[in-house]
Image (cartoon, helix red, strand yellow):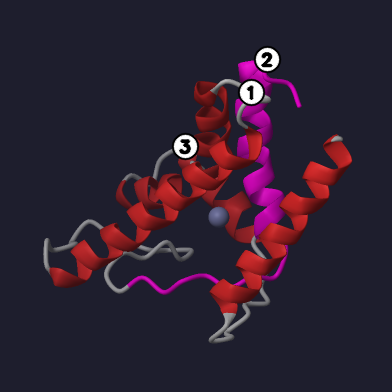
Amino acid sequence: MLPSHPIVVAVAGFASHFVIDAIPHWDYPLQAISVRKNADNRLLKADRRLWMDLLTIATDASTGFAVAILLFYPSAPIWVIALGAAAGMLPDPLQFVHSLYKREPLVTLQRFHVWIHTKRKLNWQIGIVSQAAFAALVAATALVAKQ
Ligand SMILES: [Zn+2]
């Protein structure tokens, strides 16, 4: 909506993470990394479980970037789309950073993130399918509204 204002794009992307986290959703399970309220990842070992988590997260993030670019290019430059997508993803890696360094402003951000995150978790086996269908519906609605 505002490709010529990258700071607004970044702030809106960052803020949108929390709005979306407030909606009941399915979170894919991580085996080694924890981002729970009082998680401590300082003793993580570079084992298979950690590599699988990193692969899962990398796949998720890459898919997010690809879908964002497919949806918004050429309405905005790719770097602005990537900035918005990265800002929208940033709160979750900041939870990981908080688990390593429990300092401000990460402590306050983590408290807010845990508070706003829905307490209703969907444990459906079809979680990823239902969320992909919902995302496609939202994207289709946005594309129709844009015309
Ligand atoms: Zn989150």
Q: Is residue 61 left or right of residue 58?
A: right
The residue depicted at 53 percent of the width and 86 percent of the height is 125
- Crowding at label 1, few (<14), some or many (≥20) Cα neighbours within 10 Å? some
* Residue 107 visible, this angle: no
The residue depicted at 42 percent of the width and 61 percent of the height is 35
Instruction: Write down the region rendered in magenta.
Output: 1-30
Residue nearest the viewer, comparing 114 with 31: 31
- Give the label on residue 76, or none: 1
Give the farthest residue toward the top: 4
Q: CA distance from mark 3 to mark 1?
A: 34 Å
Q: Nearer the viewer, mark 2 or mark 1?
A: 1
The residue depicted at 66 percent of the width and 50 percent of the height is 18
Query: The C terminus lies in which quarter of the figure?
Result: top right
Residue nearest the viewer, comparing 113 with 29: 29
Quarter of image, ligand 1: bottom right
Q: Position of residue 79 (x, y in %)?
A: 50, 22
Q: CA distance from mark 3 to mark 2?
A: 28 Å
Residue nearest the viewer, comparing 92 with 6: 6
- Crowding at label 2, few (<14), some or many (≥20) Cα neighbours within 10 Å? few
Q: Is residue 26 left or right of residue 139?
A: left
Q: Quadrant of residue 121?
A: bottom right
Q: Position of residue 82 (x, y in %)?
A: 50, 31
Q: Of the residues shown, which amino acid type is indicated by label 3?
A: Glu
Q: Of the residues shown, which amino acid type is indicated by label 2?
A: His
Query: The N terminus lies in which quarter of the figure?
Result: top right
Q: Is residue 127 left or right of residue 28?
A: right
Number of marks in picture? 3
Which residue was labeled with disc 3? 104
Label located before the other in sequence (3 or 1): 1
Which residue was labeled with disc 2? 5
Helix, strand or loop at label 2? It is loop
Label located before the other in sequence (3 or 2): 2
